[in-house]
Image (spheres, rainbow, N blue to C red):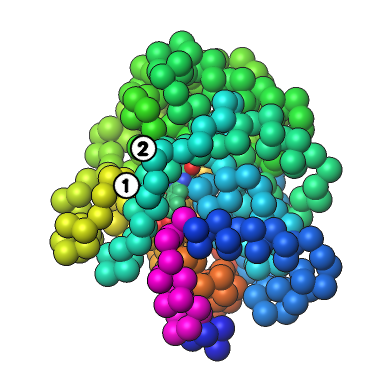
C-alpha cells in the first residue's frame, strides 16, 4: 500500500520539482523525524522489518542487522542517522566527507532519467568539511553500523599525488581520533570532481594505501571502486588492495559512459553534465562483484552497489558474491518502504533456496 501511495501520488509531485530541492527537503524532514521518539516509533510502524536469524551477519567484526545499507551520496552530513534504523536499513554510509569544505559544482547538478531508472549526478563532492561533520556527530546515538565515506577535497590544491594523499589522510586521522563511525569507505572513484579519479591507477592507489596503513585505523576500511573497469583493470587494483589494511571493496560508483545501453537516448539528449546511478550501473557492478568474489573472496568482503530496485536484484548481487548491498536510486524511484520490502523479500528467497542465513547464499552462483 505504501508503495502505491509513493509511486502514484508522492513521486509524481516530487518529480515536478528540482531534484536537489526535493532531496534537501527529504533529508531535512528525515532529520526532523529522527529527533522525536514518537516519530521514530511511527516510522518504524510503517517501514521497519527485522529477521535476526535470516538477515543478521557479522562482517569484519561489525554486526549488520540486515544486508541493505544506504550508499554514500544521499546523506552528506549525517542528518539521517537517527531515522534510518527505523526505516529498516541495516547500515548507513554518510558523505562523502572531505577535509576541506566545498559548496559543490554549479547547479543544476542532480537530474532524473525515469526511463533509464537513473539519476544524473554532478555534485562534485559537496561537503561541509570533516571537522564540522565530526562536531555534528559527537554524542549522537548510533544504532546501526555507520560508515564514513572519505574523499579528497575537490580543489586544485589537492590535485597532486602528494597533496591528494595528505588530504585523505587528514580526514581519516580526524575520524579515527574522534572514534566516530563503524567503518570507513575510501572513495577513490568520484567521477565528477576536479582532476577526475586520481587514485584509480595501481601505482597511485598503492601510494595512498601505504600512507593509510601507517595510521593503523581502528575501524575496518573498504574501498569504493570505479564501476567502468574491465576485469583486468579491476584485478590490477585488487592486487594492490589485498596487500594493505583493507577488508573489502564496494562495486561501485557512478557510470560515466554515455553509450551505456541502459541509458535512454531521448533522455540523454535533454540532460547536462554528470554521471549516472541506477540501472546503468547494474550490469557492470554485477560483473565486478562476480569477478572479485571468484578471485578474492578469501581476502576481501564484497559489497554490491548499483541498480538495486527489488529483493530479487539484491539477492542476485548476494548470490554473485556480495555480502552486503547498498542502494540510493531504487529508493528514490520506488519509495522508502523498499528497504523493508527488500529485507522481507530476501527472507522469502532464502527460505525458498533452503538457507537459514544470508551468509549461506553469498557467492553461490560463483562457487
Ligand atoms: C545523488 C548522488 C550522490 C552521490 N554521491 C556520492 C558520494 O559522494 N560518494 C560516493 O562514494 N558515491 C556517491 N554516489 C554513488 C552512490 O553511492 C552509488 O555508488 C551509485 O549511486 C549506485 O547505486 P544506486 O544505483 O543504488 O544509486 C552518489 C550517488 C547519487 C545518486
Q: Secondary structure at mark 2?
A: loop
Q: Is residue 214 above or below residue 89?
A: above
Q: Residue tagged by mark 1?
A: 275
Q: Which mark is residue 35?
A: none
Q: Position of residue 171 (x, y in %)?
A: 62, 26
Q: In the depicted view, which residue is nearer to us: 159 or 91?
A: 159
Q: Residue at x 25, y 55 (%)?
A: 271
Of mark 2 and mark 1, the one earlier in the sequence is 2
Specify few, some or many for label 2: CA neighbours under 10 Å numbering under 14, 14-19, or 20 or more: many
* Labels 2 and 1 touching (C-beta < 8 A): yes
Q: Secondary structure at mark 1?
A: strand
Residue 32 vs residue 89: left or right?
A: right
Q: Position of residue 298 (x, y in %)?
A: 50, 40
Q: Position of residue 250 (x, y in %)?
A: 46, 44
Q: Main secondary structure of the magenta part?
A: helix
Q: Is residue 98 above or below residue 94?
A: above
Residue 55 vs residue 156: left or right?
A: right
Q: Which residues are magenta?
A: 6-20
Q: Is residue 76 above or below residue 175?
A: below
Is 40 within the magenta?
no
Q: Residue tagged by mark 2?
A: 192
Q: Farthest residue in the bottom direction? A: 1
Is 12 within the magenta?
yes
Residue 65 vs residue 189: left or right?
A: right
Amino acid at each position: 500500500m505504501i508503495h502505491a501511495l509513493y509511486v502514484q501520488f508522492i513521486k509524481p509531485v516530487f518529480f515536478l520539482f528540482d531534484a536537489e530541492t526535493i532531496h534537501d527537503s527529504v533529508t531535512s524532514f528525515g532529520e526532523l523525524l529522527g529527533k522525536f521518539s514518537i516519530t521514530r516509533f511511527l516510522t518504524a510502524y510503517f517501514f521497519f522489518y527485522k529477521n535476526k536469524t535470516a538477515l543478521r551477519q557479522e562482517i569484519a567484526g561489525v554486526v549488520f542487522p540486515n544486508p541493505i545499507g544506504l550508499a554514500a551520496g544521499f546523506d552528506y552530513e549525517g542528518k539521517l542517522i537517527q531515522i534510518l534504523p527505523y526505516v529498516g536499513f541495516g547500515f548507513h554510509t554518510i558523505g562523502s566527507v572531505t577535509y576541506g569544505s566545498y559548496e559543490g559544482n554549479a547547479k543544476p547538478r542532480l537530474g532524473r532519467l525515469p526511463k533509464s531508472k537513473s539519476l544524473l549526478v554532478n555534485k562534485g563532492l559537496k561537503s561541509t568539511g570533516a571537522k564540522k561533520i565530526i562536531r555534528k556527530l559527537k554524542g549522537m546515538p548510533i544504532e546501526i553500523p555507520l560508515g564514513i565515506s572519505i574523499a579528497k577535497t575537490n580543489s586544485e590544491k589537492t590535485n597532486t599525488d602528494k597533496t591528494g594523499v595528505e588530504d585523505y589522510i587528514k580526514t581519516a586521522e580526524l575520524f579515527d581520533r574522534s572514534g566516530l563511525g563503524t567503518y570507513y569507505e575510501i572513495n577513490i572513484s568520484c567521477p565528477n570532481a576536479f582532476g577526475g579519479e586520481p587514485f584509480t591507477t595501481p601505482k597511485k592507489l598503492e601510494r595512498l594505501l601505504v600512507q593509510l596503513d601507517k595510521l593503523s585505523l581502528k575501524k575496518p576500511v573498504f574501498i569504493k571502486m570505479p564501476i567502468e573497469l574491465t576485469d583486468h583493470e579491476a584485478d590490477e587494483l585488487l592486487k594492490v588492495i589485498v596487500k594493505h589494511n583493507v577488508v573489502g571493496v564496494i562495486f561501485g560508483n557512478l557510470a560515466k559512459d554515455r553509450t551505456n545501453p541502459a541509458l535512454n537516448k531521448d533522455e540523454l539528449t535533454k540532460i547536462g553534465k554528470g554521471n549516472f546511478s541506477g540501472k546503468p550501473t547494474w550490469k557492470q557492478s554485477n560483473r565486478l562483484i562476480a569477478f572479485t568474489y571468484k578471485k578474492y573472496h578469501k581476502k576481501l568482503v564484497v559489497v554490491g552497489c548499483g541498480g538495486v530496485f527489488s529483493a530479487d536484484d539484491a539477492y542476485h548481487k548476494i548470490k554473485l558474491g556480495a555480502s552486503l548491498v547498498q542502494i540510493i536510486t531504487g529508493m528514490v524511484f520506488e519509495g522508502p518502504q523498499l528497504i523493508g520490502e527488500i529485507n522481507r523479500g530476501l527472507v522469502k528467497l532464502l527460505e525458498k533456496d533452503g538457507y537459514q542465513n544470508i551468509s549461506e547464499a553469498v557467492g553461490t552462483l560463483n562457487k
